[in-house]
Image (cartoon, helix red, strand yellow):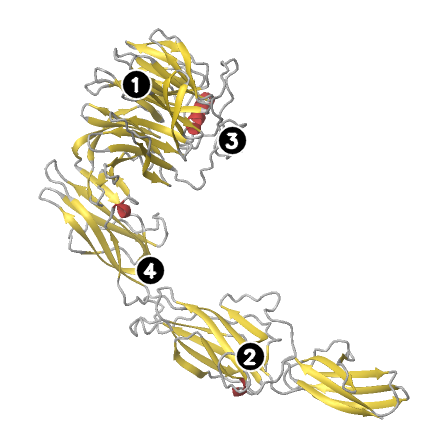
Amino acid sequence: MIDLSRFRAAARCAALACAASLVSPAFASGTAVWEMNSYNDFIRGRFSGVSINRDGRLSLAPAMASLLDSDQAVIWSMALGPDGAIYAGTGHRGRVYKIDAAGRAALLWTAQQPEVFAVAVDRAGAVYAATSPDGAVYRIVNGKAEQFFAPQTRYIWSLALGQDGALYVGTGDAGKIFRVDAAGKGELYYNSGQSHITGLAVDAQGRLLAGTEPNGILYRITAKDRGFVLYDAALPEIRSILPMPDGTVYVAALGGSVAKQEQAAKDAVANPATGIPTLTTSITVTAQASEIKPPDPSKPQAQSPVPGAPAQPALAAATAVDTSNVDKSAVYRINADNTVETLWSSKEENVYDLLALNQQVLFATDAAGRIYGLAPDRRVALLAETNEGETTRLLPARGSVLAATGNAGRIFRLGETPGPSGWLESPVHDAGAVSRWGSLSWRGDSPAGSSAAFRTRSGNSERPDATWSDWSAPLTAASGSPITSPNARYLQWRVEMTGTATAAPVVNSVTAAYLPQNSPPILRSINISAQAAPAGSTGGSASSSAYTVTVTDTGAVPSTPAVSPTQVLSRAAANQIVVIWQADDPEGDRLVYDLYFRGDDETQWKAIKTAIHENSALFDADMFADGKYYFRVTASDKEANPPSTARESELISSPMFVDNTPPVVTPGTARRTGASAHVEFEAADSASPLRRCEYSLDAATWVPVESADGVIDSLREKFSLDLAGMAAGERMLVIRAVDSAGNSGVAKVALK
């Protein structure tokens, strides 16, 4: 039998690397390959002056020239005048800039409020600028501004000019739209019941389209107080609306950016000296506290309505939308029959604006200010990165595309031809272990006058930092150049592309080969248990006893031993020992095991089973005499690696006690007086402590007996037993003692 009552010592364990040098790491035999060849592969990198088409081809991006550096934190809005001039509204100092047809930029006007969230230009060239917070719409003619309309609301988010010349004004935080005629006379045109009107546009039929927040509803408004819900999005905010001549409408929706703009305005008011808040420009807006769930502390709530503002009945209740399990942003297409398609969505990027070109729709996001192209077949290409915090607005102007940005308020012009140079840094690749780098190769084309040069760097931290190696010298051979970066776990490459207007390089795929270090197997635990074999069997599985012990490679000792309470077990003819271990290999190599044992008083390990692939072994307990034993398991990946690089680990179990010898019960003094008797006896065991003693009188039920010292826990114990109320005549007393292994010894005493 196996006695596990003493398995309280700390688990002895070791993961020792065998047949491997401590100076030079062993590398696995199989070469691994890191290949990037698709759009989804390359889009995870960092770009400057490089585009990715929908097939995953890298090329030089359109040339990008800076038209305006506003020295402001963000450009909120842009509009194109009839003479080709561009007007831009900024935050957080409330400025309007003008860029004339020749590309000269100048400050046109500075508002008293810190934010100009929207600008519009009419057919006569008059500029309308909406200021916030608590602002108004100003009309600017020949550089002179005068208040045109004051809606008495906290924010003015959007402006749109109707076909009849009327100006539509979208406001917050009451979600109202005002219509203002040429004389500046305004009326409430539509009350959405939402908190904010975040976007306005006029379609080809002259109908007003309005996007809202916090329920992400797109309205089509055909007359005063007459609206139709064109789409109710799953995202909280409709940010950009792009109506097409055929009745199709493209819509950009996101998790909400109004709250950020609100916070920007508050910070600008609170800090007029700098006017620059610390927040970025993409935070989800919240509705009024009475209308939605408790806000996230990181997302400021909308302000209360301005006292004295005209009260209007809400046409729809503004309720909160749970967006925890939806995308962060999306681009939708609403067809002329009002059916809706999701063309693009993202859980990482916010989409801010849309722009229609002849063959594609552009959209801008907050991922390094990226500008994407969406083809009619719904395939996406990355056209350019501004490398600013976000690209907030897109505008067609003079045969090109203008992009306004935030975090640094700038305007860029995208040219029609590729730029002269650009680069791409790949995402970091995790080889899983320290690796020996092979060669880097690429497929593509580099016509005469163009080039694509690669560099690599490596390190052992997940993110590149000062501990990483420097970028290597250029690797120019497309067929493969040796990677000279130091052996490490992580690798990154960078391609630098140069070209001309007529010759530009193209990269289709990049491949890096490497040999990972061969790590030793990991032996996690050894479990030893005893089981009684079924009658008539000599092996195989059987019901396990309650005695088990587990050793793990943590070295930790549980506060309570992982064993069941001691039980009395029948002594089967063939008791068995089961050894089970858990092991795995970091590289997934197939493992081969050897199992050894040794006695506590022995110095050499004896093999029980070798070269096995199972993680268990079963054998008869009778193979071991009484005593303490240890088991050792070795795991090797030698079948998957050459001898010079194969690795081995071992783990040693806690001690196992084998005790097949029952206790010896020795009767002592026995006296009977009438109906009473006094009996003294001893019980002793040579291997394991005693755990229980009991008696039976005339084959009656067993009755426990207490030891002389009160606790039965030693190899030898003394007992005394007093019996009373016995009937006359001869009585038979049987005494039984049980040790911690479950072995029992008996003795008989005749009481006359």
- Marks 4/1: CA distance? 64 Å
Tell me which corner region of the image, top left, top right, bottom left or bottom right, holds residue 415: top left
In the rendered view, tell whether residue 463 sits above or below residue 7: above
Task: From the top left corner, tell me how far across and down residue 550 is, in percent.
Answer: 53, 71
- Marks 2/1: CA distance? 86 Å
**Which residue is rendered at x = 30% and y = 12% of the image?**
165
- Marks 3/4: CA distance? 51 Å
Give the mark nearer the N terminus: 4 vs 2. 4
Nearest to the observer: residue 285 or residue 46: 285
**Badge nearest the viewer, 3 or 4:** 3
Task: From the top left corner, tell me how far across and down residue 207 is, in percent.
Answer: 32, 20
Q: Residue furthest front?
A: 337
Q: Is residue 715 visible?
A: no
**In this figure, which residue is indicated by the disc labeled 4?**
434
**In this figure, which residue is indicated by the disc labeled 1?**
206
**In this figure, which residue is indicated by the disc labeled 2?**
531
In the rendered view, tell whether residue 307 sits above or below residue 636: above
CB within 8 Å, label 2 to label 1: no
**Badge nearest the viewer, 2 or 1:** 1
